[in-house]
Image: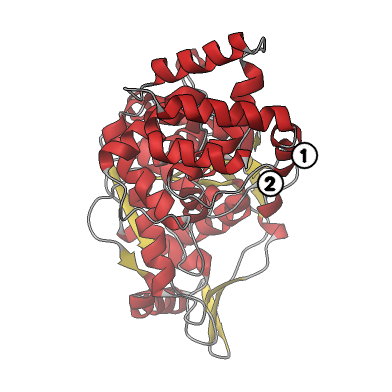
Amino acid sequence: MSDRFTVRFAPSPTGYLHLGSARTALFNWLCARHAGGRFLLRIEDTDRVRSDVKFLEEILADMKWLGLDWDGEPIFQSRRFDLYREKAEGLLRAGPAYKEGEAILYKVVPGRTVVIEDMIHGRITFETENFKDQVLIKSDGSPAYNFSCVVDDAAQGITHILRGDDHITNTPKQVLFYEALGLTPPRFGHMPLIMGPDGAKLSKRHGGVSVTEYRNEGFLPEALANYLILLGWTPPDSIEILPLAEAAKLFEIEAMNDVQAKFDIQKLKWMNGEYIMKKPSVGLRPLLKDQLRRDGFDLSAVSDDFLGRILELYQIRIKTLREFGELADFFFKDDFPVDEEARGKYLAPSSNRDNLREFADRLARLDEFKHDRIEAVCRTLAEERKLKAAEIIHPARLAVSGKTKGAGLFEIMELLGRDRTIQRMRGAAS
């Protein structure tokens, strides 16, 4: 086994990359980058029926999206069956293993205590009386999970294994295989699993979905990565906004939490909003365009400059990129939805419609359609009619945007332009 610090992430391409697996990958990457070691990939595709290249492509794309890179080329377990059989037959010849039909099993000797010095939980002990004999090679010729892991971890020179608590019971069995093969086991660390806010295992109802779905919902990769590493590790001084490169400098396995972490979608949205707010517009625009297209917006006639100007109005108001389209849809289409309850409140009264018509007429006569000039017209009209400015602003906002809140009305009007603004106001007043 190599002396150089080496960890691995070993996804199975039988489904998409979910949050728990993404967190495992992130922590292994942090370990490697902090130690100046290697972060390797192993594709555990021994399930020939369920493994699919489309899942593998999605997993690797999601890892790259999160900001992870790896060293060397991944190895594929489906291409190593001969090696597993060779190692199992070696144990068969040496005595610790036996055949049962076409399968090869390892005989577990009772009366032993297997001790694991876990990097997160401390000492954990297991009694071999509680283990049945372990399958090495199944009757169909495929390797058992625990055996193929040991063969490959040894071949890849893995020095540290960091994985979820759900693997704790696999560890003593794997230690027995290391010993049988004459190998020194790596160090193990088991992370408490991510739980839902109610303390139950994280599931779809808590938001425990795939990384791809979070991407499609408008979360930034740096925000999702940042949030996931806080579910198991508290950085020095309890820093919360911490990009991966900075986290790698500070990360220590021994500082990981040994209690279960609770997933909180509201905390994730807050963090995503912080990243959106601080991200330069030039870097946010292409991500935003991708999001808008995914959400069905036609951007063929939308310039980057126009999109950037809208973004300036909403960047501090959104927690996800999807929210941008929901709040600013009226900039991109004229058939935007209108809040029906607000329509009855603000556009049904004839006095409000009359004010809206007059406001539109005065805007039509403006020599310069700028937000400060638009605001001056609004406030002058309100003063003349002995109204609060809000009594004109609310109907006007609903007329031009279909909404009761959002960015500043006068900035919205300037950006929409004179013609679209007046047309919408007159249409709502008719």
Identity of the residue drawn at 61% across and 35% down: 398
Q: Is residue 368 visible?
A: yes
On the rendered image, what quadrant is the C terminus found in? top right
Q: Any mark on residue 198, and which?
A: 1
Report if the CB atoms under discs 1 and 2 are less than 8 Å apart: yes
- On residue 206, the disc is 2
- Vertical placement of residue 350 versus 17, above or below: above
Q: Is residue 144 above or below residue 7?
A: below
Q: Residues within 10 Å of mark 1 (few under 14, many from 20)?
A: few
Residue 286 image position (x, y, % from top left): 30, 45
Of the pair 326 and 50, the residue shown nearer to us: 326
Q: Amino acid at mark 1?
A: Asp
| Residue 333 pos. (x, y %) | 46, 50
Q: Residue at x 50, y 30 (%)?
A: 360
Q: Quadrant of residue 311?
A: top left
Viewer-side label of 1, 2: 2
